[in-house]
Amino acid sequence: MNKKRLAYFLILPAVLAMLFVHIIPMIWGFVISFMDLDITYIMDWTKAPFVGLENYAKGFSHVTTIGKRFGRSMLNVGIFGFLTITIGYFMGLGAALLLNKPFPGRTLVRGLILLPYITPDTVTFNFWRFIFQARIGILNKMLKSVGLIHDNVIWLVGNKSLYAVTVAAIWKGWPFGALILLAGLQTIPREIYEAAMIDGASAWQRFKYITFPYLKPVTKTFIIMNILWNFNAFNQFYVMLGNDPGMAAEVPSTLILRRAFNHFEYGLGSALSMMLFALMIVITALYFYFFRIRSQEDA
Protein backbone atom coordinates (compact mmCIF):
# COMPACT_ATOMS: atom_id res chain seq x y z
CA MET A 1 0.00 0.00 0.00
CA ASN A 2 1.54 3.30 -1.09
CA LYS A 3 1.53 6.42 1.08
CA LYS A 4 -1.38 8.02 -0.74
CA ARG A 5 -3.64 5.00 -0.28
CA LEU A 6 -2.54 4.68 3.34
CA ALA A 7 -3.50 8.31 3.95
CA TYR A 8 -6.99 7.77 2.49
CA PHE A 9 -7.37 4.58 4.52
CA LEU A 10 -6.46 6.36 7.76
CA ILE A 11 -8.90 9.24 7.25
CA LEU A 12 -11.72 6.95 6.08
CA PRO A 13 -13.20 6.43 9.60
CA ALA A 14 -13.34 10.18 10.19
CA VAL A 15 -14.92 10.76 6.77
CA LEU A 16 -17.56 8.09 7.40
CA ALA A 17 -18.29 9.54 10.85
CA MET A 18 -18.73 13.02 9.37
CA LEU A 19 -20.93 11.60 6.63
CA PHE A 20 -23.33 9.70 8.89
CA VAL A 21 -23.31 12.08 11.86
CA HIS A 22 -23.32 15.46 10.07
CA ILE A 23 -23.69 15.46 6.29
CA ILE A 24 -26.57 12.99 5.77
CA PRO A 25 -28.69 14.33 8.70
CA MET A 26 -28.11 17.87 7.42
CA ILE A 27 -29.28 16.97 3.92
CA TRP A 28 -32.26 15.08 5.32
CA GLY A 29 -33.15 18.02 7.54
CA PHE A 30 -33.00 20.38 4.56
CA VAL A 31 -35.32 18.12 2.55
CA ILE A 32 -37.97 17.70 5.25
CA SER A 33 -37.94 21.44 5.98
CA PHE A 34 -40.11 21.76 2.85
CA MET A 35 -42.61 19.17 4.13
CA ASP A 36 -45.43 19.17 6.64
CA LEU A 37 -43.83 16.27 8.46
CA ASP A 38 -45.33 15.37 11.81
CA ILE A 39 -45.85 12.23 13.87
CA THR A 40 -48.51 11.01 11.41
CA TYR A 41 -45.91 10.46 8.69
CA ILE A 42 -42.91 9.58 10.82
CA MET A 43 -43.01 5.92 9.77
CA ASP A 44 -42.76 6.92 6.12
CA TRP A 45 -41.59 10.52 5.86
CA THR A 46 -41.65 10.44 2.04
CA LYS A 47 -45.47 10.56 2.15
CA ALA A 48 -45.55 13.83 4.08
CA PRO A 49 -47.21 16.70 2.13
CA PHE A 50 -44.87 19.07 0.33
CA VAL A 51 -45.53 22.64 1.54
CA GLY A 52 -42.64 24.51 -0.09
CA LEU A 53 -41.55 27.57 1.84
CA GLU A 54 -44.50 27.56 4.24
CA ASN A 55 -42.39 26.44 7.21
CA TYR A 56 -39.83 29.17 6.49
CA ALA A 57 -42.61 31.75 6.16
CA LYS A 58 -43.88 30.79 9.62
CA GLY A 59 -40.42 31.24 11.06
CA PHE A 60 -39.82 34.63 9.44
CA SER A 61 -43.29 36.07 9.98
CA HIS A 62 -43.79 38.58 12.77
CA VAL A 63 -47.50 37.74 12.82
CA THR A 64 -47.38 34.04 13.68
CA THR A 65 -46.62 32.83 17.19
CA ILE A 66 -43.65 30.83 15.90
CA GLY A 67 -42.29 33.83 14.04
CA LYS A 68 -42.55 36.04 17.11
CA ARG A 69 -40.86 33.47 19.33
CA PHE A 70 -38.11 32.78 16.80
CA GLY A 71 -37.43 36.50 16.39
CA ARG A 72 -37.30 36.98 20.15
CA SER A 73 -35.06 33.93 20.50
CA MET A 74 -32.59 35.43 18.02
CA LEU A 75 -32.58 38.70 19.99
CA ASN A 76 -32.04 36.80 23.24
CA VAL A 77 -29.19 34.71 21.89
CA GLY A 78 -27.62 37.85 20.41
CA ILE A 79 -27.65 39.57 23.82
CA PHE A 80 -26.41 36.39 25.46
CA GLY A 81 -23.60 35.97 22.92
CA PHE A 82 -22.49 39.61 23.10
CA LEU A 83 -22.27 39.61 26.89
CA THR A 84 -20.59 36.23 27.23
CA ILE A 85 -18.04 36.90 24.49
CA THR A 86 -17.19 40.44 25.60
CA ILE A 87 -17.01 39.85 29.35
CA GLY A 88 -15.46 36.40 28.94
CA TYR A 89 -12.75 37.80 26.67
CA PHE A 90 -11.68 40.56 29.04
CA MET A 91 -11.80 38.24 32.05
CA GLY A 92 -9.68 35.73 30.14
CA LEU A 93 -7.29 38.44 28.99
CA GLY A 94 -6.81 39.72 32.53
CA ALA A 95 -6.17 36.21 33.83
CA ALA A 96 -3.78 35.46 30.95
CA LEU A 97 -1.75 38.61 31.64
CA LEU A 98 -1.44 37.65 35.31
CA LEU A 99 -0.58 34.02 34.59
CA ASN A 100 2.06 35.07 32.09
CA LYS A 101 4.08 36.63 34.90
CA PRO A 102 6.39 34.45 37.02
CA PHE A 103 5.21 33.75 40.58
CA PRO A 104 5.38 30.78 42.97
CA GLY A 105 2.82 28.09 42.15
CA ARG A 106 2.06 29.50 38.70
CA THR A 107 1.77 26.04 37.09
CA LEU A 108 -0.72 24.91 39.73
CA VAL A 109 -2.83 28.03 39.31
CA ARG A 110 -2.84 27.60 35.54
CA GLY A 111 -4.32 24.17 36.03
CA LEU A 112 -6.85 25.25 38.66
CA ILE A 113 -8.40 27.99 36.53
CA LEU A 114 -9.46 25.35 34.00
CA LEU A 115 -11.72 23.61 36.52
CA PRO A 116 -14.88 25.57 35.54
CA TYR A 117 -14.24 24.87 31.86
CA ILE A 118 -13.64 21.12 32.18
CA THR A 119 -16.50 20.51 34.60
CA PRO A 120 -19.43 18.82 32.80
CA ASP A 121 -22.21 21.19 31.75
CA THR A 122 -24.85 19.34 33.75
CA VAL A 123 -22.87 19.71 36.97
CA THR A 124 -21.95 23.34 36.35
CA PHE A 125 -25.38 24.63 35.41
CA ASN A 126 -27.21 22.64 38.07
CA PHE A 127 -24.83 24.23 40.54
CA TRP A 128 -25.71 27.69 39.24
CA ARG A 129 -29.41 26.86 39.17
CA PHE A 130 -29.18 26.12 42.88
CA ILE A 131 -27.38 29.44 43.46
CA PHE A 132 -30.18 31.36 41.70
CA GLN A 133 -33.08 29.52 43.39
CA ALA A 134 -35.53 32.05 44.81
CA ARG A 135 -36.28 30.42 48.20
CA ILE A 136 -33.19 28.36 49.02
CA GLY A 137 -30.62 29.85 46.66
CA ILE A 138 -27.30 31.08 48.02
CA LEU A 139 -27.45 34.36 46.08
CA ASN A 140 -30.66 35.62 47.66
CA LYS A 141 -29.45 34.60 51.12
CA MET A 142 -26.20 36.54 50.62
CA LEU A 143 -28.00 39.62 49.29
CA LYS A 144 -30.40 39.55 52.23
CA SER A 145 -27.56 39.20 54.71
CA VAL A 146 -25.96 42.44 53.51
CA GLY A 147 -29.28 44.28 53.24
CA LEU A 148 -29.36 44.69 49.46
CA ILE A 149 -32.74 42.97 49.14
CA HIS A 150 -35.59 42.28 51.57
CA ASP A 151 -37.70 39.84 49.56
CA ASN A 152 -36.56 36.89 47.51
CA VAL A 153 -35.76 37.76 43.91
CA ILE A 154 -36.98 35.33 41.26
CA TRP A 155 -33.94 34.91 39.03
CA LEU A 156 -34.91 31.91 36.90
CA VAL A 157 -38.28 33.13 35.62
CA GLY A 158 -39.04 36.28 33.66
CA ASN A 159 -36.72 39.00 32.42
CA LYS A 160 -33.88 38.18 34.84
CA SER A 161 -33.58 34.57 33.68
CA LEU A 162 -31.56 35.39 30.57
CA TYR A 163 -28.96 37.24 32.63
CA ALA A 164 -28.83 34.49 35.25
CA VAL A 165 -27.88 32.02 32.52
CA THR A 166 -25.42 34.55 31.08
CA VAL A 167 -23.59 34.82 34.41
CA ALA A 168 -23.33 31.04 34.62
CA ALA A 169 -22.11 30.79 31.02
CA ILE A 170 -19.43 33.46 31.59
CA TRP A 171 -18.16 31.62 34.66
CA LYS A 172 -18.07 28.40 32.66
CA GLY A 173 -16.38 29.82 29.57
CA TRP A 174 -13.84 32.44 30.61
CA PRO A 175 -11.04 29.92 31.35
CA PHE A 176 -11.05 28.94 27.66
CA GLY A 177 -10.27 32.56 26.77
CA ALA A 178 -7.54 32.66 29.39
CA LEU A 179 -6.02 29.47 28.01
CA ILE A 180 -5.77 30.50 24.36
CA LEU A 181 -4.79 34.10 25.17
CA LEU A 182 -2.04 32.83 27.47
CA ALA A 183 -0.78 30.67 24.61
CA GLY A 184 -0.79 33.76 22.41
CA LEU A 185 1.12 35.81 24.98
CA GLN A 186 3.84 33.18 25.18
CA THR A 187 4.53 33.52 21.45
CA ILE A 188 5.46 37.20 21.77
CA PRO A 189 9.28 37.60 21.75
CA ARG A 190 10.63 39.08 24.98
CA GLU A 191 13.15 41.12 22.98
CA ILE A 192 10.36 43.35 21.68
CA TYR A 193 9.28 44.25 25.21
CA GLU A 194 12.88 44.87 26.27
CA ALA A 195 13.46 47.16 23.31
CA ALA A 196 10.25 49.07 24.07
CA MET A 197 11.27 49.49 27.72
CA ILE A 198 14.66 50.82 26.67
CA ASP A 199 12.85 53.34 24.46
CA GLY A 200 10.82 54.45 27.46
CA ALA A 201 7.44 52.90 26.54
CA SER A 202 4.97 52.74 29.43
CA ALA A 203 3.11 49.58 30.43
CA TRP A 204 -0.01 50.79 28.60
CA GLN A 205 1.98 51.60 25.46
CA ARG A 206 3.59 48.15 25.51
CA PHE A 207 0.18 46.55 25.80
CA LYS A 208 -1.37 48.75 23.10
CA TYR A 209 1.39 48.53 20.49
CA ILE A 210 2.88 45.09 21.21
CA THR A 211 0.64 42.78 23.23
CA PHE A 212 -2.73 43.53 21.69
CA PRO A 213 -1.58 43.47 18.02
CA TYR A 214 0.21 40.15 18.57
CA LEU A 215 -2.97 38.71 20.11
CA LYS A 216 -5.16 39.56 17.11
CA PRO A 217 -4.97 36.09 15.49
CA VAL A 218 -5.84 34.42 18.79
CA THR A 219 -8.60 36.95 19.43
CA LYS A 220 -10.04 36.28 16.00
CA THR A 221 -10.18 32.56 16.71
CA PHE A 222 -11.67 33.10 20.16
CA ILE A 223 -14.46 35.34 18.86
CA ILE A 224 -15.53 33.20 15.90
CA MET A 225 -15.56 30.01 17.99
CA ASN A 226 -17.64 31.68 20.68
CA ILE A 227 -20.05 33.15 18.14
CA LEU A 228 -20.76 29.67 16.81
CA TRP A 229 -20.94 28.13 20.29
CA ASN A 230 -23.18 30.80 21.77
CA PHE A 231 -25.64 31.01 18.89
CA ASN A 232 -26.09 27.25 19.28
CA ALA A 233 -26.31 27.50 23.08
CA PHE A 234 -28.55 24.82 24.54
CA ASN A 235 -27.16 23.06 27.63
CA GLN A 236 -27.04 26.09 29.87
CA PHE A 237 -30.62 27.13 29.07
CA TYR A 238 -32.05 23.62 29.21
CA VAL A 239 -30.39 22.70 32.51
CA MET A 240 -31.08 25.98 34.30
CA LEU A 241 -34.49 26.91 32.88
CA GLY A 242 -36.00 23.67 31.61
CA ASN A 243 -37.63 22.73 28.34
CA ASP A 244 -39.51 26.03 27.99
CA PRO A 245 -37.50 29.01 29.29
CA GLY A 246 -40.26 31.45 28.35
CA MET A 247 -40.11 34.35 25.90
CA ALA A 248 -37.64 36.30 28.04
CA ALA A 249 -34.96 33.61 27.78
CA GLU A 250 -36.00 31.64 24.69
CA VAL A 251 -33.12 30.75 22.39
CA PRO A 252 -33.30 29.06 18.96
CA SER A 253 -32.09 25.67 20.19
CA THR A 254 -34.76 25.34 22.90
CA LEU A 255 -37.47 26.56 20.52
CA ILE A 256 -36.41 24.07 17.84
CA LEU A 257 -36.30 21.23 20.37
CA ARG A 258 -39.79 21.97 21.61
CA ARG A 259 -41.39 22.38 18.17
CA ALA A 260 -39.71 19.30 16.70
CA PHE A 261 -39.77 16.82 19.58
CA ASN A 262 -42.54 18.03 21.91
CA HIS A 263 -45.04 19.20 19.30
CA PHE A 264 -43.80 16.71 16.68
CA GLU A 265 -43.55 19.41 13.99
CA TYR A 266 -40.44 17.96 12.40
CA GLY A 267 -40.73 19.95 9.19
CA LEU A 268 -41.08 23.25 11.03
CA GLY A 269 -38.23 22.35 13.40
CA SER A 270 -36.00 21.53 10.44
CA ALA A 271 -36.88 24.84 8.76
CA LEU A 272 -35.96 26.76 11.90
CA SER A 273 -32.69 24.83 12.08
CA MET A 274 -31.90 25.68 8.47
CA MET A 275 -32.64 29.35 9.14
CA LEU A 276 -30.25 29.33 12.08
CA PHE A 277 -27.64 27.50 10.01
CA ALA A 278 -27.93 30.07 7.20
CA LEU A 279 -27.62 32.92 9.69
CA MET A 280 -24.44 31.38 11.12
CA ILE A 281 -22.94 31.17 7.63
CA VAL A 282 -23.75 34.83 6.97
CA ILE A 283 -22.33 35.99 10.31
CA THR A 284 -19.16 33.92 9.83
CA ALA A 285 -18.67 35.21 6.29
CA LEU A 286 -19.15 38.83 7.36
CA TYR A 287 -16.80 38.32 10.29
CA PHE A 288 -13.99 36.95 8.15
CA TYR A 289 -14.62 39.63 5.50
CA PHE A 290 -14.34 42.35 8.14
CA PHE A 291 -11.09 40.92 9.49
CA ARG A 292 -9.64 40.57 5.99
CA ILE A 293 -10.42 44.22 5.24
CA ARG A 294 -8.89 45.30 8.58
CA SER A 295 -5.79 43.18 7.91
CA GLN A 296 -5.36 44.77 4.49
CA GLU A 297 -5.71 48.26 6.01
CA ASP A 298 -3.15 47.46 8.71
CA ALA A 299 -0.74 46.11 6.08
Image: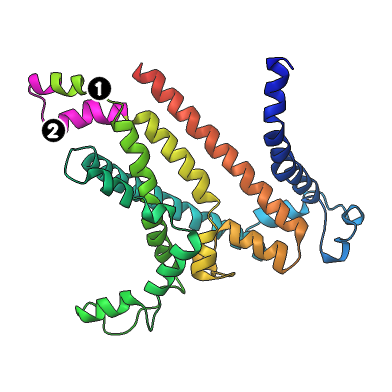
* Residue at the farthest front position: 1
Name the one closer to the observer, 30 or 21.
21
Secondary structure type for disc 2: helix
229 in relation to 214, above or below: below
Q: Position of residue 44 (x, y in %)?
A: 90, 57
Question: Circle 2 is placed at which residue position?
Answer: 203
Q: Is 194 placed left or right of 70 in the picture?
A: left
Quadrant housing residue 24: top right
Q: Is 277 placed left or right of 113 in the picture?
A: right
- Which amino acid type is marked by label 1? Pro
**Looking at the rendering, in which quadrant would you find the C terminus?**
top left
Q: Is residue 254 magenta?
A: no
Q: Position of residue 121 (x, y in %)?
A: 49, 59
Question: Circle 1 is placed at which residue position?
Answer: 189
Span of residues in magenta: 196-214
| Mark 2 to mark 1 CA distance (whole Å) | 16 Å
Q: Position of residue 103 (x, y in %)?
A: 16, 42
Secondary structure type for disc 1: loop
